Image (cartoon, grey):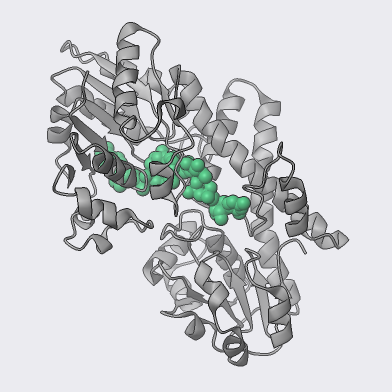
Amino acid sequence: MKITKICCIGAGYVGGPTMAVIAQKCPHIQVTVVDLNEQRIADWNDPNPENIPIYEPGLSEIVAEARGRNLFFSTEVDKAIDEAQMIFISVNTPTKTYGKGKGMAADLKYIELCARQIARVAKQNKIVVEKSTLPVRTAEAIKSILDNTGNGVQFQILSNPEFLAEGTAVTDLLNPDRILIGGDTTEEGEEAINALVDVYSNWVSRDKILTTNVWSSELSKLTANAFLAQRISSINAMSELCEKTGADVNEVARAIGMDSRIGPKFLKASVGFGGSCFQKDILNLVYIAKSYGLNEVADYWEQVIIMNDHQKRRFSNKIVQTLYNTVADKKIAFLGWAFKKDTNDTRESAAIYVADDLINEQAKISVFDPKVSKSKMLNDLDYLETRTSQENIKALNSFENAYEACKGAHAIAILTEWDEFKTYDWKKIYDSMHKPAFVFDGRNILNAKELESIGFVYNGIGS
Ligand code: NAD
Ligand code: UGA
């Protein structure tokens, strides 16, 4: 089947950038991204491409090029489903907050709603592509919903997990390490796989397009995230040991990373990983393992999350202890709120948890993040339900620039590794602070010697 019309349900961090790149690279395919969230769609359609709802380097240029040509954002979900030969499901799959599997399992209600909507609307055969990250064997559930419409429409279900990382979404999409496509081993299944392979082959070389059975593809996505997060928790575990022994975690990471069997990536010790996926996907993996009675497997992976929670708490504890065991009424300036640099996404950001701990100790938090608004920060804190919104408003303030945020602070904590933090006039910042002036560098991005020579008391991670 030659694909000329694609629909993507879900205009989020994955659906938006992924479809923008498909549209840019396949001008012969009409790509329509739909979402129930009217504001989100309105933002994607903002006449000024700089105002699209997701900040990713290079994305606004691609949207500017393809939007209105063969890339469309719409709230007309039924129409887009009806017209498309291939439908990507790219909706959120958060951790369940209720019922069986609460706090662990993936909540598949949005996925099921999509499947039911497709089943209701489709009048012709369609290929349905799981783009969201899903528990292994979800395709089975989707298939059972789609196969029971009684109207004779045939569906093929493919798994095509997304491996992009936020902040580098565009380059990851343009030059992926691999594209993974899982499908049925039947003739129709292989036809569907080939149709999707053809889409990607417009810009990805064939040797990077991997095809597998559906279950391997679904499970590979959870496995990849578990392995990546496991490396961070491993190096973070070592960072604590480094602090006790006089070893330096940056040096240790470099030394082990040069072993080609280990490799240098994802060995950066930090205040803890954040983001919408690592924790959610590992908890989901743990839940799946437990549901098969594989308790050792479950415990092994759960430790990655336990270590990460410990690392975040350790960071806030260290701030309190170093500031003479009290931060009550002290101003602590946060540089960064996003879960990593070059994104405006704050989901599960370590900053939220560190702020929450410090506010419990009655600190006043003043934040500067180049891409995150104050209302988003307050929403993040409110979501934890530790205290009332009014109390959060009193405890957290946000500033338009870093110098204002740091003025009169007792300590600065670096929560996100934004490049611009390295270029600041740190002497000017020092002069505006209470003394002794402390820096807690949760990302090890600043030059410790330079800061110490200015007069700062510098604390990094793992040294
Ligand atoms: P997101 O929350 O940014 O976007 C999901 C969108 O789907 C929302 O705008 C929501 O309104 C919409 N939606 C939900 N139900 C809908 C429905 N029935 N009809 C129409 N729209 C609906 O989520 P995201 O970050 O893009 O993640 C989507 C999936 O991709 C998740 O499974 C996630 O695990 C996976 N993933 C995310 C990333 C990432 O970097 N964020 C990377 C790889 C994979
Ligand atoms: C991650 C994976 O890298 C993607 O491949 C995957 O597609 C995605 O999850 C997903 O499934 O959502 P993302 O969370 O966007 O991407 O960003 P990462 O670069 O992986 O960073 C995650 C967190 O780990 C950030 O808080 C980051 O600061 C932290 N991190 C990363 C470290 O603390 N140390 C490192 O060495 C690397």
Q: Nearer the viewer, residue 301 or 206?
A: 206
Indicate whether 139 appears above or below 455. above
Which quadrant is the C terminus positioned in? bottom right
Identified at 57% across, 90% down, the residue is: 428
Side (left or right) of 317 relative to 14: right
Q: Is residue 195 above or below residue 386?
A: above
Residue 5 at x, y = what percent?
18, 31
Which residue is painted at 49% across and 80% down in the image?
402
- Toward the right, the furthest residue is 245
Q: Residue furthest top?
A: 187
- The total number of labels drawn is 0
Estimate the x, y position of residue 421 in percent, counting from the top left.
54, 73
> In what quadrant of the picture does the N terminus appear?
top left
Q: In the depicted view, which residue is nearer to us: 3 or 387?
A: 3
Q: Position of residue 449 (x, y in %)?
A: 73, 77
Which is more toward the observer, 214 or 37? Answer: 214
Identify the image quadrant of residue 227: top right
Evaluate whether residue 334 shows in this view.
no
Name the residue rendered at 39%, 29% in the picture.
160
Residue 378 location (% of width, % of height) = 43, 67
Image position of 425 (left or right of 200): right
Q: Is residue 448 above or below residue 123?
A: below
Observer able to see residue 184: yes
Q: Residue furthest bottom?
A: 431
Is 146 positioned to the left or the right of 218 in the image? Answer: left
Horizontal arrangement in the rendering, residue 54 relative to residue 218 (left or right): left
